[in-house]
Image: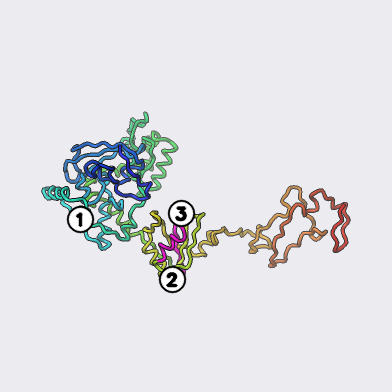
Amino acid sequence: PVHHECAASRGMVKAAAAPDGLESGTDFPIVCEVCLGPNPYLRMIKQPNAKECKVSGRIMTSFRWKPGAAARYKETVISPEVARAKGVCQCCLMDMEYNLPVGVRDALVASGGGPDQKQLPETGVNQTYYYDQVAKASREDVEAAYGKMANDKLLRMSRAQPYYDRNLPKLCSFWLKGACSRVVQGDCPFRPCCGTFRFPELAGSNPDGMRKLTEALERLGTVEVMRDKSADMEEIKEQMRASQRGSRDQNIRDRYHGTDDLTSKYIGKADKMDLTPPEDKTITTLYVNMMGQQITKDDLTDAFYAYGEISNISVVPASNCAFVTYIERESAEAAAKKLAGVLSIKGARLKLMWGRPQKAREMQGQTKGLPMPPSDPAMTAGGPGMGMPMMNPFPYPGAAMPLPGSGPMAMPMAPMPGAFAMPTMNYPSMNPNQMGTRPDRIPPPPPGRPPQKK
C-alpha cells in the first residue's frame, strides 16, 4: 500500500513524490498526481523487468494500480530514463510541471523566447546510447538539459486543477457496435456499460451529441441505447469509434515526440486565450471571479498595484467576485495582458475578465448590484416614470376604502399628471371601518376638531 498527497488537496498538479525510503524511478514510478487519483491510499503492484518501453524498447520495471473505485487500472508505459529525458509522466506522458502535453510545452517554450528542444533519437543505436547516458546521469542534470522556461502562454495554458476524467474506464467497443452481451448481466467493466456516463471524447468536438447521449442513457438505460439504431445515435457512436482507432503504441510514440493531433489542438487554443480590450475606452474596470476563495481587498491590491494607479477595489462577497478599477485605461490593459489566465492569489487560480459598462448592466436589470424597480405604469404611483411602487393602503380582507375627501381620515386625492407624490402607508388602526368603530353612529366633528369617541 502507498500513501500519497492527492492533487485536489493542494489545489495544483505536480509530480507525485516517492514515499519515504523509496527511490523514484526504481521503487516508485515517475507519475503525476492525476494518474494516482484523488484517494491518498492505494495498492500498487510492482513487476520487475516485466514490460517493454513503448518508446525506446528498453526492458523496464512495471507498476500497476487502480486510481479509484470508478477508474480503470493504470500502468507505466515508458521507462524511467525516457520519462526523465523530457520530464513527463510514465503513465500519461503529460508534462510534470504544467500538466500539458509535452509537444505543447516545448512549442510554447520556444515561442516565448526559450531554447528550442532538441530532437531526440527515435530508432537504432543512437537511441540506445542516448538513453543509456540519461540513465547514468543525475536527475538534476537531465532535467536541466531540456531547459524549461516559463512564459505567459505556458502559465496560461497550464492546468491548476486535476483532470480525473483521464482515469475513466475505457470505452466498450462491443457496446458501440451494439453487440455487448455482458451489459445485460451488468458485469461489463467498460463505459458506459458500468454506469459511468462521462464522455470526454465528445466534449470538445460534439458537446450537443454528448449531452444527448448522456440524457438518453439516464432515461432509457445502456441496453436500450445500445440497441438504438437511429441516425443521430449512430452518428454519435461512429464519432466515438473513430476516437479509438489507430495503433495504441504508435499514439504513445507520437504523443511523446509531440507529433500527435492533441498537440496542434492545444497550440491553437493557446493563441485564442488573450483578453481583447473593449472598444469603449472609458472602461477601466477588471472583473475578478474569486472561484470560491476567501480573497480580501489587500490581497487584490498586492496583485494589481504594480500595473498602475488604482482608483477603487470593490469586493462583493455575496457574488464571490471583485472589481478592480484603474485611473488610466493603459494600466487596465497592462494588467489584463499580464494577469489573464495566470492570476493566482493564495495558491488559487482566479478568472480575470474585462468589466462591462454601466449602461449594459442597467439594460440587464442591475444597477450598483441591485435589481431595477418595476417599470409597469400600473404598478407605480403617479403614472409612468414615477418609479415608486404603489402600496395597497388596506391589505386586509374586509377593509373598505373610504370615499376621498370625507372625514378626518380622508384619503389623499390622486396627484395631478406630472406631479410627484410619495405613497402613504396606512395601517388597519387608521381605517374607521376596522377595530369595532361605527362611523355611521358618530356625528361628523366640527372643522378643526378631532372626532368624538363613543
Where does label 3 land, which residue? Answer: 294
How far, Cα to Cα, is label 1 from label 3? 40 Å
Residue 247 visible (yes or no): no
Q: In which quarter of the image is the N terminus?
A: top left
Q: In which quarter of the image is residue 57?
A: top left
Task: Using residue 420 as the reference point, say whether residue 332 is left or right of it.
Answer: left
**In the current view of this chain or complex, which residue is farthest to the left?**
125
Among the two numbered marks 1 and 3 on one chain, the one whose residue lies closer to the N terminus: 1
The stretch in magenta equals: 281-305
Among the two numbered marks 3 and 2 on one chain, the one whose residue lies closer to the N terminus: 3
**In the current view of this chain or complex, which residue is farthest to the top?**
185
Give the image location of residue 143, x and y in percent: 22, 53
How far, Cα to Cα, is label 2 from label 1? 44 Å
Please tell me the numbered disc located at residue 328. 2
Report if residue 292 lies within the magenta region: yes
Helix, strand or loop under label 2: loop
**In the current view of this chain or complex, which residue is farthest to the front?**
21
Mark 2 surroundings within 10 Å by alpha-carbon count, few (fewer than 14), some (14 through 19), many (20 or more)? some
Where does label 1 land, which residue? Answer: 145
Task: Using residue 319 as the reference point, say whether residue 14 is left or right of it.
Answer: left
- Comparing marks 2 and 1, which lies closer to the viewer? 1
